[in-house]
Amino acid sequence: MSKSIVIHETGGPEVLRWEESSPKKLQPEEARVKIHSAGVNYIDIYFREGLYPAELPMTPGLEGSGVVESIGDKVTQVKPGDRVAWASCRGSYGLTVNANAQSLVSVPDNISLEIAAASMLQGMTAHYLTYGVRETKPGDTALVHAAAGGTGLLLVQLLKKAGATVIGTCSTEDKAQKVKSAGADHVILYSSEDFVAKTKEYTNSKGVAVVYDSVGKDTFDKSLKVIQPRGLMALFGQSSGPVPPFDLQRLNQGGSLFVTRPSLFHYTSDRSSLEHRAKEVFSAIENGLSIAIGRTYPMEDAAEAHLALSSRKTSGKLLLIAPS
Ligand SMILES: NC(=O)c1ccc[n+]([C@@H]2O[C@H](COP(=O)([O-])OP(=O)(O)OC[C@H]3O[C@@H](n4cnc5c(N)ncnc54)[C@H](OP(=O)(O)O)[C@@H]3O)[C@@H](O)[C@H]2O)c1
């Protein structure tokens, strides 16, 4: 028998239950991985709440790291004993996972399994936002909402490395210090300050070339007002709720603006793009990218981690650690 967090019905954090489960039969293209750490991501909350549909019962979690135990007949990418990490294997909140070997990447020897689990989903997201949805160039200006979050702190660092001037928003002074330490040029406390006025002030009324908005409902509308003509809105999340339908004519009025609603899974959908982004993130870590692990929890305390994430109390990455 194995153990995992199981959801039998969608709902609040209390639906996450630590239960015994029998491992599923390994398919020819799968590898069974003994999990070391699982990353907690906002998308796990969307699945738990039912905002994103999934067949029940299900074990949540898409991200993690561990060691390969065994492989199916057709697996060539990894072998037993390999240290691996992933960003898209459903069922990562458990002791083991049967992962499609295509979605596993090797972890370099000098990177710990904790750091690997903490950097896959949010790190590759920060990477495709910096280089994929548009190529960041020196002189660009970017506004990053929820900049003290797991994704936000990484995005600020990568944008700075690419030469952009970065304005970050967050809700508390404590978080603002972390955003500053990540390298942001300006920080706006959007819970008490008007981020439209402040962004205009910091850009001499020009606005920014791009807004990275993971907050959604509470920030989307105002964010459109701080984008330069022909600039981009990258709406990549909805931590405050989904953005309601809006009039496309507003893109014209705002200055021929562009909007994209991207997903990491479309920027790592084939093996070569996954390997490329993972390699870039690991190499950035080796060259000083700081992975801030906000807190670790025992795997069975997934509910506590979810509650902390959705109540805006966290900064950086949350990890669930499997019992050894
Ligand atoms: N599309 C993609 O490829 C992709 C990939 C990764 C993540 N995401 C999305 O990016 C977002 C951030 O994910 P994350 O895992 O890095 O989480 P996170 O940013 O660490 O946590 C969410 C943060 O959002 C802010 N927030 C603002 N209003 C909120 C509200 N009403 N409720 C809760 N939080 C609120 C809070 O920061 P303040 O307290 O500073 O406001 C909170 O700490 C999520 O929406 C996630 O789905 C998308």
Image (tube, rainbow, N blue to C red):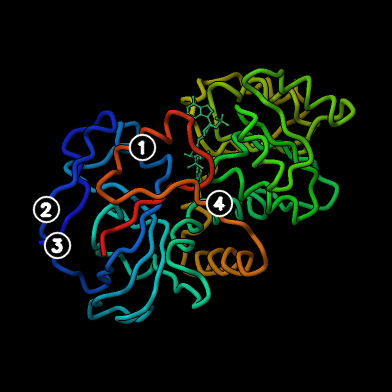
Identify the disc placed on residue 68.
none
State the SS at label 2.
strand
Q: Position of residue 301 (x, y in %)?
A: 28, 44
Q: Amino acid at mark 3?
A: Pro
Tell whether 154 sits left or right of 71. right
- The residue to which callout 1 is attached is 306
Left or right, residue 163 beside residue 127: right
Q: What mark, if any, has residue 20 been given in the picture?
A: 2
Kindly report the distance in space between the C-alpha atoms of the residues bearing marks 1 and 2.
21 Å
Residues at marks 4 and 2, CA–CA distance in whole angstroms: 32 Å
The residue labelled by disc 3 is: 23
Residue at 63 percent of width and 54 percent of height? 132
Q: Amino acid at mark 2?
A: Glu
N-terminal-most mark, 1 or 2: 2
In whole angstroms, how far apart are the C-alphas of marks 3 and 4? 32 Å
In the picture of the structure, the residue carrying the numbered disc 4 is 292
Query: What's the residue type where badge 4 is placed?
Result: Ala
Closer-to-camera residue (274/69): 69
Q: Dot 3: what SS?
A: loop
CB atoms of marks 4 and 1 within 8 Å: no
